[in-house]
Amino acid sequence: MYKQWSKFVAKWESDPARYMFDTVKIKDGYIKNLNHYFKHTKVMTDKAVNEKPVRAIVESDKGNKYVFVGYVDTEYTDEDGNLVLVDYKTSSKSSFSKAKLPEKSMQLRLYAMAEHQVHGIPYDKIKARFDMAKYCTVHFKQENGKWKTSVQERYQWVEKMRKKLETKLKKTDLDPITIEEMIDTACANNDMDNLPEDIREQFYIENYFIEIDINEDDIKELNKHIGNKCDEIVALEDIEDLEGYLSYTYPYDPDNYYDKKLCAYHTSDYFKKRENLVDDLPPEENLDEDTAWLFGGEMDKQQDDETDEIMNMLFG
DNA sequence: CACGATCATGGGCGTAGGCC
DNA sequence: GGCCTACGCCCATGATCGTG
């Protein structure tokens, strides 16, 4: 996996029209974390199915039915006979906080619903989880003998254990200078290979999974929620002057980051041409590195063309 | 929306002081 | 002198904030 990933990164680096990170810090952290992920994650080549197509039928309160097709990143059956659905995330965990999880997990719960509908698998035999690739779960032994866990960005997990390593190593007969050198080396390598055996065995890492609870009640509610949402969308598309309606109900605000950068409609060529809007300067990384900025305006050309087609279909 | 930074909170751990 | 408990400091964690 690491080899494939490295090739992919190299190709991306050499592409003048590549997508950019907002800052160098974000880029470096992201790539270092994923380097570590691909070096240390074992793949189940035999049991697992990747990009598995699934189909769910949802029904609104009005009785309208809608078909959803999705692709499960990875699916396999574990040793207890549970069907495990995995979704890989490379984003930061802040957007997967407790409060946001119900919404974020709709995707996985819809997959679970699909597998239940098609194969009759009971919900208590379905497990669903996000594999947060930037992070790992660090297991460490406390001084009271109990094991505890801590979630850390992969590229600096040893550095984050520095204080704990200090207290543990101070209890040995090693002299303070040696201790500091050892810890510095471990942090620089981001592993504990150079540390004494009895220290090393007090730490180990695993993938960081966010487990999603799968139960019938939640999924019944989700079914209706999505069905009703579809009804709303269908009703919206039936409005006669949709474009006029939207420009009045949801006026474009160029100071709103969502409106300006993320909204499929307001970022489309169709809308920009209509409003005579010019593209913003590309992000900071372009300014001090190479000549990629020259291509900034062309960056999303293909995407924009696709978006444009859809926008013309819907509004044009 | 997703990011890093910042802030508040709670638990672990070391230490001081009391007791046997 | 050894053990136990209370207290305070420090660190990790999670929520919130400001920004592109």
Image (cartoon, coloured by chain):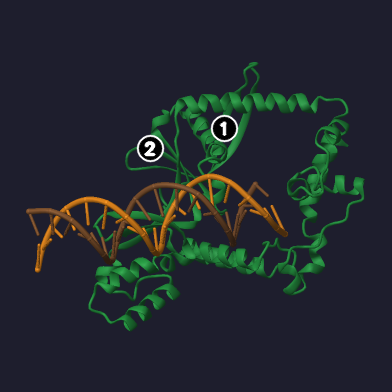
Chain colours: A green, B brown, C orange
Q: How far apart are marks 2 and 1 (CA)?
A: 19 Å
Type of amino acid under label 2:
Asn
Pinpoint residue A192: horizontal percent, then vertical percent: 36, 71
Q: How crowded is mark 2: few (under 14 residues within 10 Å), some or many (20 or more)?
A: some
Which residue is painted at 64% across and 68% down in the image? A24
Which residue is painted at 56% across and 28% down in the image? A222
Which residue is painted at 62% across and 28% down in the image? A226
If you read the primary sequence from the N terminus, does the residue marked by circle 2 or circle 1 appear first?
Answer: 1
Pinpoint residue A207: horizontal percent, then vertical percent: 42, 54
A202 or A166, nearer to the observer: A166
Which quarter of the rendered picture does the C terminus of chain A lie within?
A: top right
A271 or A41, nearer to the observer: A271
Pointer 1 residue: A55
Pointer 2 residue: A82
Type of amino acid under label 1:
Arg
Which residue is painted at 28% across and 82% down in the image? A175
Pinpoint residue A29: horizontal percent, then vertical percent: 56, 65
Q: Which picture quadrant has residue A188?
A: bottom left
Secondary structure, mark 1, is: strand
